[in-house]
Amino acid sequence: MITALKVRLEPNNKQKGKLFQSAGVARWAYNWTLAKQEENYQNGGKFIFDGDLRKELTQLKKTEELKWLNNYSNNITKQAVKDACDAYYKFFNKLSDKPKFKSRKKSPPKFYQDTEKIKFKNGKVRLEKIGWIRLSEKDRVPEGVKYTNPRVKFDGVHWYVSVGIETEQEAVELSDESIGIDVGIKNLAVCSNIDTPFKNVNKSKKIRKLEKKLRRLQRKVSNKYEKNKEGRSYVKTSNIVKLERNIRKLHKRLDNIREDNRHRVTAAIAKTKPSRIVMENLNVSGMMKNKHLSKAIASLGLYRFKQTMQYKCSKYGIEFVEVDKWFPSSKTCSECGYVKNKLSLSEREFICECCGISIDRDKNAAVNLSRYKAS
């Protein structure tokens, strides 16, 4: 199986500049590809394959206007073109939404590295046409192995390099148990085989304190913008830059706490060694349209939780089953099988009208998911 490894980079100022420039090249190539596909589609043409666009880009690099692209690795533009074509192809096959042009302000800086040219040695990584960059962790990535899909990304605070390496699947003796997991806002996860639910980390004292600090900094920077307003434009002073840097660091700290909690919860569930784990395929994009719940759902990262759970299942050889969102897991009685016609979100206890059982609605849903059988 492929295991992903992610390590923080410690570049100097010169290397930081090259990293941002390389990310800009990748963004330019991605947008150039989308523009070509859009223009071709509007003129009645068929889908342009990435190989044809790469050949065209190679010829454009010889011109005076775009010769600056030769200062950067050709694998950056090559992969960016491929990524854009894949996104456009999925859109036409109704597998995803229409790809958008990448913005310098909103899109995170990232780019691809060639699998043969990236090297790890003595706590450093060698990136093509950038050089050797020190890593924050010396022995995290093994040396002299085959790497897959190397990516370099900036998260707003630090630069990271991520690679995939081939590892052997752990030999784990699994039980015959099937576990159902019901995720939600009140509790992050309720399992059919575990009595104590996994709490929502966003309700913890630590997170609430950091969010309060974040709101205070955001108000402060907003007030400074208003004070430095000149006509219809705003002046970004050194103090504003410092405040925005602190806000980015605080966002990153919150993300790290939430991601750590997701890994702890999924690891605890996977280590019970069931043969099967069942989760409901939630309509997260639809849930985000509810203005009263959108912030809570976004901070929970339910889709990311499902991805992490899938990764842990593949690691231990556990079968992962995803149930359709229309499956009435909450409305069905786990004792007698009676299905309610209506169950409001405010009803936290499931009371069966047929057998009279009273059970927590999330626990009831988890038990029903654990018994799910695909038709």
Image (cartoon, rainbow, N blue to C red):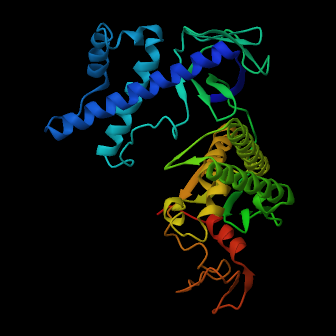
Q: Residue furthest front?
A: 231
Q: Is residue 269 above or below residue 203?
A: above
Expressed as whole percent of the image width and height from the top left, the position of residue 180 reads 67, 62
Asked whether the viewer can see residue 223, the reply is: yes
Q: Nearer the viewer, residue 114 or 61?
A: 61
Q: Quadrant of residue 213?
A: bottom right
Q: Is residue 181 above or below residue 37?
A: below
307 relative position to 62: left or right: right
Q: Residue at x 18, y 40 (%)?
A: 42
Q: Nearer the viewer, residue 110 or 139?
A: 110
187 relative position to 317: left or right: right
Q: Quarter of the image containing the N terminus?
A: top right
Q: Nearer the viewer, residue 216 or 21?
A: 216
Q: Residue at x 26, y 20 (%)?
A: 52
Expressed as whole percent of the image width and height from the top left, the position of residue 375 reads 46, 63
Expressed as whole percent of the image width and height from the top left, the position of residue 171 reads 73, 34
Asked whether the viewer can see residue 1, the reply is: no
Q: Is residue 38 above or below residue 278?
A: above
145 relative position to 201: left or right: left
Q: Residue furthest left?
A: 44
Q: Residue at x 28, y 15 (%)?
A: 55
Q: Quadrant of residue 359?
A: bottom right
Q: Residue at x 33, y 38 (%)?
A: 88
Image mark count: 0
